[in-house]
Image: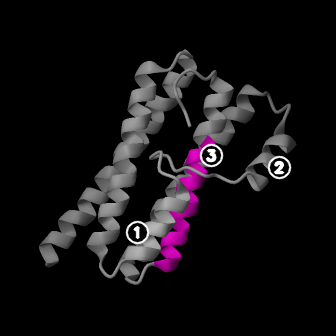
Amino acid sequence: MLTGKEDLILSLIEAYLMEKGTMDFYSHAAAKALNQDAGKMFGELSQWEHKHMNFIGYLYQSIQEDRDIIGFERFAEKTEAHYTEAGIPVKDLEAKLEKHGFVDDMGALILALEIEGKAYSLYSRLAKSAVDTNARVVFQEMSEQETKHIEYLKKIRQKLGETS
């Protein structure tokens, strides 16, 4: 888990893993959602997390000047991600999903807002406290991306409120 004391390379690797964990969870949630709209929302969030992974991977490879492309590709394929960007273990979220199930959009939305809110808090904190100045820039960008996710989810919440 990121603390802000990592150098840029380690920060990118750890951020990549958290994004992967979040993507994996959202993908799992999309497949398990009982409600079609909840499944669609989780699917879109999963795609966004995949884009974050690509962004972080691009930064990593740019810094490495393409010296380690194959190594990074192997790492990306074989490494399991145990935590989400919210700092919540993937297995805990999956257990929560199995225990409660989502019979409506609002339950799914609340869970997604919790994840994205915690991710925003983490990246914002790291953007302020990271020792490596380049890592701070990356964390600032990631916190801005999380803001976009939260705004997306708030719009969905507003639409749900209008149809209730």
> How far, Cα to Cα, is label 1 from label 3?
22 Å
The residue nearer to you, when weighing 59 against 31, is 31
Q: Which residue was labeled with disc 1?
A: 41
What amino acid is found at the position of numbered circle 2 in the picture? Arg
Residue on which disc 2 sits = 74
- Point 13% across, 78% down: residue: 164
Q: Residue at x 43, y 67 (%)?
A: 96
In this view, 151 is above or below 41 = above
What secondary structure characterizes most of the magenta part?
helix
Labelled pair 3, 2 in contact (Cβ < 8 Å): no
**136 displayed left or right of 153:** right
Q: Is residue 114 left or right of residue 33?
A: left
- Sequence-wise first label, 1 or 2: 1
The answer to the question of whether label 1 and label 2 lie on touching residues, with beta carbons closer than 8 A, is no
In the image, the segment drawn in magenta is 16-32
> In percent of the image, x 78 and y 54: which residue is there?
78
**SS of the residue at dot 2?**
helix
Disc ID at residue 137: none
